[in-house]
Amino acid sequence: MVYKNYYKILDLETSQVSVEEIKNAYRQAAKKYHPDLNIGDTLAEEKIKDINEAYKTLSVPASKRKYDRIWNSQFNKEKKAFSSEERKGAILNMFFGKTEKEEKQEKNVYKKVGTKGENIETEINVSLDEAFYGMEKMLSIREVEGKIKKISVIIPQGIQNGEKIRLIGQGKASIDGGKNGDLLIKINIEDNNKFKLRDNDLYTDLLLTPWEAALGTRTSVKSIDDETKIYIPQGIQSGERIKIPNKGYQKQNGRRGDLIAEIKVVVPKQLTDKERKIFEELRDASVFNPRK
């Protein structure tokens, strides 16, 4: 291919897209060709490189405008401003500082004497919301020389707890001119005060009054992205669980786990005079004794 079509690489049908649309396309592509999901697939590794190059260029408005201008002026099908070899050299040199010939020469050198640098492994904590919806996060990495290097990392939407993101070429430099190692980032998803993540299921507490638990009711349960109406059967006990299908966290196959609502019956700490009278009447009238 003479010239890399970055929009096609990111599966975008037009250049008239926003930065947010470019980010979303990058997240989907990066997740699809993630090295840890395509172990041993050299094609996927090359694809990831193209995806990273495309995102790096198109996500910056100034760089995107420059790319679009070159495409429209020099690489439009109706124009023949350069020969094929000149087109290759021009675009590679403009965006990457190397001609195709230089890149081939460099690859030959790597094959002969270069050894890949060491990988660097680290881990970061992200919130449930950040992992569920995806985000861009800045990392500060201390290099061998002691300098701090800031790296932008795209957390793909629905990333799994414990999953690793591989940033190709962001590891330690080679000692003999080979490729840099990679940076492997393990993702730890943190529970919050509303939800706990277990595999792909989300656990939450559902608080009920004593009369709701005794008589049954219909109520709303909040999931991570919406709200669902459910029926509470009469006589439900504290500690029992109700499963709401497909309202949990995202799975690798794109489906979702379940939302598990654990019942907690809560009594009022303070009673009005009327409430106290009703409870006393219930006490005197009821034959129920949970200790028998």
Image (cartoon, rainbow, N blue to C red):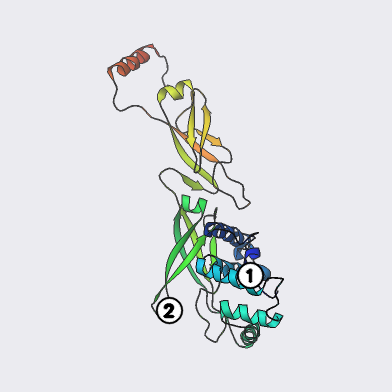
Mark 2 and mark 1 residues within 8 Å of each other at the beta carbon = no
| Residue in the foreground of this view, choosing between 30 and 73 | 73
Instruction: Identify residue type, mark 1.
Output: Asn
- Give how far across and how far down residue 99 sits, in percent: 62, 83
Q: Where on the picture, by quarter, is residue 50?
A: bottom right
Which one is closest to the eye, mark 2 or mark 1?
A: 1
- In the picture, the quarter occupied by the N terminus is bottom right
- Percent across and percent down for residue 56 are 54, 68
Look at label 2 and name its amino acid: Val
184 w.r.t. 268: above or below: below
- Check disc 2 and report the residue beneath it: 144
Q: Secondary structure at mark 1?
A: helix
Vertical relation: 221 (above or below) 277: below
- Where residue 211 appears, as percent x and y from the top left, is 42, 22
Q: Quadrant of residue 205?
A: top left
* Relative depth, front residue between 20 and 254: 20
Q: Mark 2 vs mark 1: which is more N-terminal? A: 1
SS assignment at label 2: loop
**In the image, what residue occupies the spot 40% across and 80% down?**
145
Q: Residue at x 54, y 74 (%)?
A: 169
Q: Which residue is mark 1?
A: 72
**Mark 2 burial class by Cα count in 10 Å: few <14, some 14-19, many 20+:** few
Where is residue 36 shown, x and y percent of the image? 60, 64
- Residue 95 in which image quadrant: bottom right
37 to 90, vertically: above or below: above
Residue 45 visible? yes
Which of these two is toward me, 104 or 146? 104
